[in-house]
Image (spheres, rainbow, N blue to C red):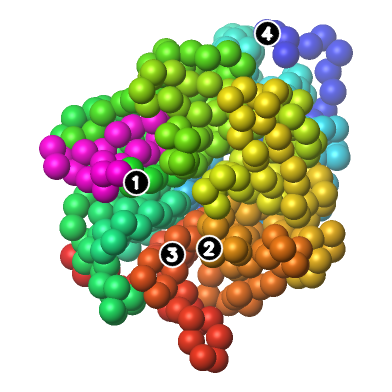
Amino acid sequence: MPSSPLTSRVRAPEFPAGMDWMNTDRPLSLAGLRGKVVLLDFWTFCCINCMHVLPDLAYLEEKYPDSLTVIGVHSAKFSNEGESVQIQKAIERYAIRHPVINDREFDVWNAYGAHAWPTFALIDPEGYLVGMTSGEGKRAVLDQAIDSLVTHHRSKGTLSPFLPPPPPSPDRSSLLRFPAKIDISGKKVLVSDSGNHRLLLLDWEEHSPEKAALREIIGQGTPGSADGSFDQAQFRDPQGIRFCPDDPDIAIVADTGNHLLRRVDFRRRSVTTIAGTGVQGWAIFEPVPAMSAVLNSPWDILFHRDGMLYVAQAGPHQIIRLDPERQEIFPVAGSAREDLVDGTGDQASLAQPSGLTSDGTRIYFVDSETSSVRVLHPGVSPRQSRVETLVGRGLFEFGNRDGSFQEARLQHPLGILWDDGLLLVADTYNHRIRALDPDARVVLSLTEGKGLDEPSDIKKGSGAYLITNTNAHEIAVLLSTSEGPVLGKVDIST
C-alpha cells in the first residue's frame, strides 16, 4: 500500500442501499464520510486471521480518533455467519467498536475486488481509493499510509475531523459471557468465561445436573497476561482448559488471545505461565524450550496417555505437544498450509484445529475451517505421525446433514468428545450436537438445532453432558432419558 495518495485517482465504490448496518445508529455512506480517512476491513467472524488483526484496528482507531473511520465489511464464509443477529453477537464477543455492514451477498467484496480474509481498502477524505492489501501483520503499512493521508489532507484543507458517536454498550447482566470451553473432574467444573477474560470454577450437583454453585473466579476479568493470585491474574479470551488427570487441583489453560499456556493451582490459588512469550508467532517445526516458544492462538489442549500435553494451534493450523518433563514443545502435525490434506504429520494440512479428544490411543480433532472431524495417530516425530479425515471434504464444503461419513456435512465445529465408542461433536454453526460412530461410519444429530446457539464444547459428567452454549451465555445440560436426549440449562447460584 502506498504511503502517499496516488496520482491516478479512482473513486471508491459506494455502499449499496438497503444493507444491514450494526454498531451504528444509522446507515453510513462514503459520500457522508467525506473529510475522513476510511479504512474498510473485509472479514468473516470464523477466521482466525481476522481475529488477529482486530488489535491492529483498535490501535489505529485510538491513534486517529477524529480523522479515521474503520468500517467492517462482513462478507461471510459460512451460511450461519451471514445472519445479522450472529454478526452482532460476534461484534460483542470481540469488542469491536466500529460500524459493521453485512455484505452477505458479497456486493461490496466484488465491487472492491477483494479476494481473501482479511482484506483492507484505504479511502482518502475526498472519496478516492488509495490502495488495498490483504493478510495479517499490516499495522505498520496501514499506519504509515493513514498518517500520510492525514498530513496531506490537513494541509490541503480537505480533512474534516470529528468524533463519531460511541457504539451501543454491551449487555453484561449475565454471569457468563461467551463461555468457550469446559472440563469436569468429579463435582468440579471449570469454564473458560472468554468474554469476561477469566475462568469460573463451579461445584456441580451430579444428582441435580441442572444446578451448580460458583466456587472460584480466577482472573481479574480484564484482558491482560499477568501471573499471580486468582485476584491478580489476567487472561485474554481463554479457550481450552483441562484438569490434570493425576492432580485435579491443577489445570492447564490455553490462553488464546495472549498466545500462552497457563497453569492454575487451586491449592495455592495462583496462575503461572508455562509456555509462550506472549508474542504471536507462526508455525513450530523444530523442538523449542517451552518458555521461548512463540505460540499462535492455542485453542484447545489435551492430556494424552503418553504423558504429553497436546495443543491445537488454530493460527498456524498445527497440533503441537508440550513435554512436561523436558519443558520443550515439539511439532506433531500440520504443514502450516490451511487445507484438508491427509498424510504424515509433516505433510498433512489442517485448517484451524479447535477441539481435541482421545480414545486413549488416537487423538480426534475438529478442523473448524474445513468443517471436518479428523484423527491423528501420534508418533515420536511428525514424519511418524499420521492424519486421516473421517468427515469433511474441504475449505468450502459444509452443510447440515446426517448420514454416512461420506454424505454428512458439518458447519464450523469447535468441540469434540470421545464417549464410549462414539464421537460427540459441538457442531457450532449448525447449533447442535452430533454423534459420529467410527465403526458404523454414520453421523446422527442428538439435538435438533433448538436451544443451542453456537455451542463450543461438550464434556461428560455423571449421567449428563455439559455444553458451553456460547452465544446464549450459559452452560447447557444434555440428559439421556427413555424418550431420548433432553436439553436444559444449568442454573448457577452465586
- Please tell me how crowded label 1 is: few (under 14), some (14-19), or many (20+) other residues with Cα within 10 Å: few
Please give the residue where the numbered disc 3 appears in the rendered image: 460
Contact (Cβ within 8 Å) of mark 1 with mark 3: no
**Distance from Cα at disc 3 to Cα at disc 4:** 55 Å
Please give the residue where the numbered disc 1 appears in the rendered image: 245
**Distance from Cα at disc 1 to Cα at disc 3:** 15 Å
Task: Indicate the quadrant containing the C terminus: top left, top right, bottom left or bottom right.
Answer: bottom left
Please give the residue where the numbered disc 2 appears in the rendered image: 419
Is residue 266 visible in the rendered structure shown here? yes
Please give the residue where the numbered disc 4 appears in the rendered image: 3
Magenta stretch, residue numbers: 245-269
Q: Earlier in the sequence, mark 3 or mark 4?
A: 4
| Residue 115 image point, x, y percent | 82, 32
SS type, badge 2: strand
Q: Earlier in the sequence, mark 3 or mark 2?
A: 2
Q: Earlier in the sequence, mark 4 or mark 2?
A: 4
Say if 463 sits above or below 65 in the image.
below
What amino acid is at disc 3? Answer: Lys
What amino acid is at disc 1? Answer: Pro
Magenta: main secondary structure? strand
Contact (Cβ within 8 Å) of mark 3 with mark 2: yes
Q: Earlier in the sequence, mark 4 or mark 1?
A: 4
**Distance from Cα at disc 4 to Cα at disc 1:** 54 Å
Contact (Cβ within 8 Å) of mark 4 with mark 1: no
Q: Earlier in the sequence, mark 1 or mark 3?
A: 1
The residue at the point 85 percent across, 38 percent down is 111
What amino acid is at disc 4? Answer: Ser
- Please tell me how crowded label 3 is: few (under 14), some (14-19), or many (20+) other residues with Cα within 10 Å: some
263 within the magenta span: yes
